[in-house]
Amino acid sequence: MVTTPAEVIAALVTAHQSVATCESLTGGLIAATLTSVPGASEVVRGGLITYAADLKTRLAGVPAAVIERYGVVSREVALGMAEGVRRVARADWGIGVTGVAGPGPADGVAPGTVWVAVVGPGVSGVRCLRLEGGRDDVRDGTVAAAIADLADALAHVQGQGGTPG
């Protein structure tokens, strides 16, 4: 199973597929982690940092009504971010993350609450994390979870006998 950023990049290269990120609480750390791997330029299309709610709408295309209804830290917004960056960047895979790094709650959401979404060819997954620790712990845990979720999605697609695109 693919688990490290280098293995994710290698799997994307082998599959001739690309990825883009839309990040809130991680502020670009997922993209930075992926692009720290030699050869990442073959498969990483780019990323959006949508820390502000209005940028989730303007850049990633998450409908303002979705943000108003569910809040920025929600399943629906994470999914919209992943779908939006995939579309905007013309990538095979999109990762969207939104959450509260802390130290305190934001908009009534507890610190450490994170939503991670991965969308790709025939795959769409979202999960909620409850991470412990300080801001750095939550952000690092989010990066690790996003990379692991992309790895799982890639393995799922490869297990289906192909690399749909």
Image (cartoon, rainbow, N blue to C red):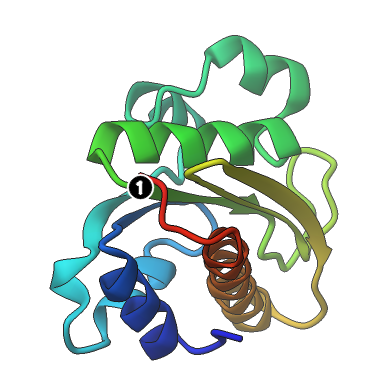
Out of 105 and 95, give the one closest to the viewer. 95
Residue at the (80%, 63%) spot, across then down: 129
Residue 143, quarter of picture: bottom right
Side of 93 relative to 152 (left or right):
left
Q: Position of residue 95 (x, y in %)?
A: 49, 53
In the displayed structure, 56 sits above or below 123; it is above
Residue at the (35%, 22%) spot, across then down: 58
Q: Amino acid at mark 1?
A: Asp
Residue at the (62%, 10%) spot, across then down: 65
Q: Locate the N terminus by quadrant.
A: bottom right
In the displayed structure, 59 sits above or below 12; it is above
Out of 140 and 123, give the one closest to the viewer. 123
Q: Position of residue 31 (x, y in %)?
A: 34, 67
Q: Position of residue 7 (x, y in %)?
A: 42, 87
Q: Which residue is mark 1?
A: 92
Side of 22 relative to 99 (left or right):
left
Element class at badge 1: loop
In the displayed structure, 105 sits above or below 15; it is above
Can residue 33 be seen here? no
